[in-house]
Amino acid sequence: MAVLQVNPTRMELSKLKKRLTTSMRGHKLLKDKRDDLMKKFLELIRENMDLRVQLEEKMAQVYAGFVVAGAAMEDASLQEALMLPQRQVYASVKTKNVMSVNVPDFQFTDTGDEGRDIYPYGFAFTSGELDASVDALQEVLPLMLDLARVEKTTQLLAEEIEKTRRRVNALEYVQIPTLQETIKSITMKLDENERSNLARLMKIKDMMIAQQRQAQQE
């Protein structure tokens, strides 16, 4: 394991210990964040699947109704019946924070009068299948927007999970072991220096005692 090139001093040792403490705390927080992101990601995957099934069922219903209506009505009559919509709808996009990630939040707005039906035609010259298809269409757009929101949120969370995973691995397998090895190396050098200084002091003390004894004998 690599060791940082730093001066083996007690001040540097103290700094490295603080860095190690901070790195370990950050590692724990990032692991917790990664786990929470994964939990939310899996919830969104399940929601995505449910919404997709609902949307596919609605779209199949719409297409089937239009096919039957097209067979029962003339093309000109069908186009004329759908020429002037009764309502207008708008979709606005905002953002919200999910697990420290800004994700889209689609808002669906219907400008039609409340209680007013959505059929832009009379019922005298149209088929019931066309009515069912138009009715199903009003449920399709909110489902599409909701599915788009979930899929984009899932994508953004997946990117955040990958970034968090890389940061966790960098701390776990590179930075923290490097700091630990550097601290261990500096501690060993300081201990060795301390033993050398102690041996030197003991030798000096022995020399001074020997000199005192020699002076007393003279």
Image (cartoon, helix red, strand yellow):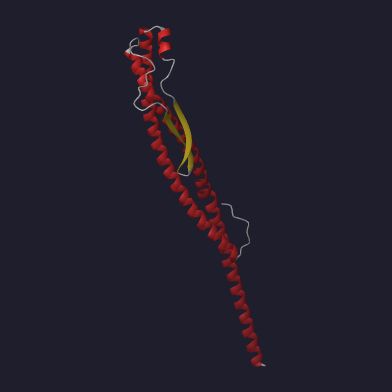
Answer above or below: position of 191 versus 58: below
Q: Position of residue 176 (x, y in %)?
A: 52, 53
Determine which quarter of the picture holds residue 51: top left
Q: Quadrant of residue 196?
A: bottom right
Is 108 or 83 nearer to us in this picture? Answer: 83
Q: Is residue 3 above or below residue 154?
A: below
Labels in figure, total: 0
Q: Position of residue 142 (x, y in %)?
A: 40, 28
Q: Where's residue 119, x and y in %?
A: 37, 18
Q: Residue at x 48, y 38 (%)?
A: 95
**In-front residue for pair 68/161:** 68
Q: Quadrant of the C terminus?
A: bottom right
Residue drawn at the location 64% of the way across and 82% of the way down:
207
Q: Nearer the viewer, residue 14 or 103?
A: 103
Horizontal placement of 54 versus 22: left or right? left
Q: Quadrant of residue 187?
A: bottom right
**Residue at position x 38%, y 14% from top?**
66
Position of residue 165 relative to residue 106, above or below, is below
Q: Position of residue 195 (x, y in %)?
A: 58, 70
Q: Is residue 57 left or right of residue 197?
A: left
Vertical side of 149 occupied by 83: above or below:
above
